[in-house]
Image (tube, helix red, strand yellow):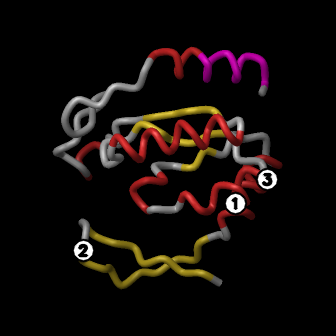
Amino acid sequence: ALYKKLFKGETAPAALQFPTADPVEAVQCVTRAGGKAVLAHPGQYGNFQALPALAEAGLWGIEAYHPKHSPEDTQKCLELARRFQLAVTGGSDFHGAAKPDIRIGSGRGNLRVPAEYLDALKLAMFLGQ
């Protein structure tokens, strides 16, 4: 099994480790349960290469807009969304007191997710897609 260390802050590992799921299995599980699996900020982790397998497993969307994405990362996500017919999402990465330098709605700096993507998400959810 794969294990992931739980971190306190950005660099200090805690004593606790917990098992992580295989990403393809996780997407399949979410989909079977009626959920919508979305790949979160792939540019931050450089995991674009996982997209074909995840899309085949039932991935529904990709987070293109994220404070840590470069403009090139965002563009790559948008291209992959078109290629694999994925919904486009985005977020400020706001986590409350855990990330006090991130503002709700705009992240670090001035992140803006175009309204057209929100409209498309609402329509897809309404239509059950």
For residue 41, the mark is none
The x, y position of residue 21, in whole percent, is: 65, 69
Q: Looking at the image, is mark 3 or mark 1 earlier in the sequence?
A: 1
Residue 4 belongs to magenta span: no
| CB contact under 8 Å: marks 2 and 1 | no
The x, y position of residue 2, in whole percent, is: 60, 81
Q: Quadrant of the N terminus?
A: bottom right
Q: Where are the magenta residues, as a range?
A: 120-128
Report the amino acid beneath label 3.
Glu
Quote the CA–CA distance across marks 2 and 1. Answer: 26 Å
For residue 56, the mark is 3
Mark 3 secondary-structure assignment: helix
- Residue topped by disc 2: 11
Q: Nearer the viewer, residue 110 or 4?
A: 110
Residue 125 belongs to magenta span: yes
The residue located at (74%, 64%) in the rendering is 25
Indicate left or right for 40 with 52 as reference: left
Mark 1 secondary-structure assignment: helix
For residue 26, the mark is 1
1 w.r.t. 104: above or below: below
Displayed quadrant of residue 87:
top right
